[in-house]
Amino acid sequence: MTKDEVRRRLEFYQDLGIKTVYRHSVSVPPTTNNQQLTTVPMPAIPALEPEHDSLLKIIEDIGDCKRCRLHEARNKIVFGSGNEQAKLVFVGEGPGADEDQQGLPFVGRAGQLLTQMIEGTAAKEGIPIKRSDVYICNVVKCRPPENRTPQPDEMEICGQFLYRQLQAIRPKAICVLGGTAAKALLGKDGVTRLRGKWDQWRDIQVMVTYHPSYLLRPYNQNAKKEAWEDLKKVLHYVYD
Ligand code: SF4
């Protein structure tokens, strides 16, 4: 295995929250001059994301998923939608009630605002894209009851599918919507502190901005302006 493959594998485990890995075997040096180098078996580690992964394969692997407690109250798994070769991917927190009914991400009020933000900003900036040109998904694929924030173990379990989606699409940039998604992808807290600046997930550029549902609250006019500025930066970086 090359150094780069080892690095990728370790990053993948880190993303899954696995902090300790073991080699299949380890060479133990001789303790006396006449002894040979011996190989001692070590516990196996699980496989890296499959070779030649694709969104279809990930959907098949999710299946009728019951890997975390969020399956109990869901109607539909919300995998993601949009252009499978998108240069830009938006990542939100999790499905709401409308999304859970339709099985599609960002179709409620927050979704309509996201569409306006993408298409309105693109039109103003002379960038010829529509919402269907980007890809949109969430950290967790099932609706948390009462729209509560997904819990760390739920994000960790479902996050593996998000990482595989991002690796399969390999966009030029990821726009992270809100603090929960920022925590899941970057391991950092605080949208206000993180927004507007470039960060990285693996080797992909990441911009954090506010979640559209936060922007729908009437007292957040200033945040709206900031979110538009963030989006402008992302669109120019990706499409110029
Ligand atoms: S949230 Fe993700 S891991 Fe949990 S049941 Fe749904 S698809 Fe499976």
Image (cartoon, rainbow, N blue to C red):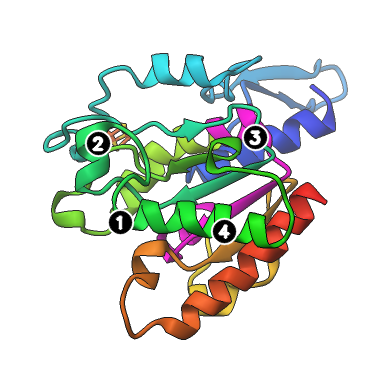
Instruction: Name which of mark 2 and mark 3 comes first in the sequence.
Output: 2
Residue 110 vertical position relative to residue 165 in the rendered view, above or below? below
| Callout in the foreground (4, 3) | 4
The residue closer to the viewer here, 183 or 239, is 239
- Look at 22% across and 38% down and name the residue there: 100
Please give the residue where the numbered disc 3 appears in the rendered image.
86
Which contiguous range is marked in magenta?
A: 164-185
Mark pair 1, 3: CA separation: 23 Å
Residue 198 left/right relative to 135: right
Q: In the image, what residue type sits under mark 2?
A: Cys
Helix or strand or loop: what does disc 3 sit on?
Answer: loop
Q: Is mark 4 within 8 Å of ligand 1?
A: no
Task: Say which quadrant the N terminus sits in.
Answer: top right
Q: In the image, what residue type sits under mark 3?
A: Ala
Please give the residue where the numbered disc 4 appears in the rendered image.
120
Instruction: Name which of mark 1 and mark 3 comes first in the sequence.
Output: 3
Q: Are marks 2 and 4 in contact (CB under 8 Å)?
A: no
- Look at 48% across and 79% down and name the residue there: 223
Instruction: Name which of mark 1 and mark 2 comes first in the sequence.
Output: 2
Please give the residue where the numbered disc 1 appears in the rendered image.
109
Residue 145 in the image, given as x and y percentages of width and height? 14, 50
| Callout in the foreground (2, 4) | 4
Q: Are marks 1 and 2 in contact (CB under 8 Å)?
A: no
Quadrant for ligand 1? top left
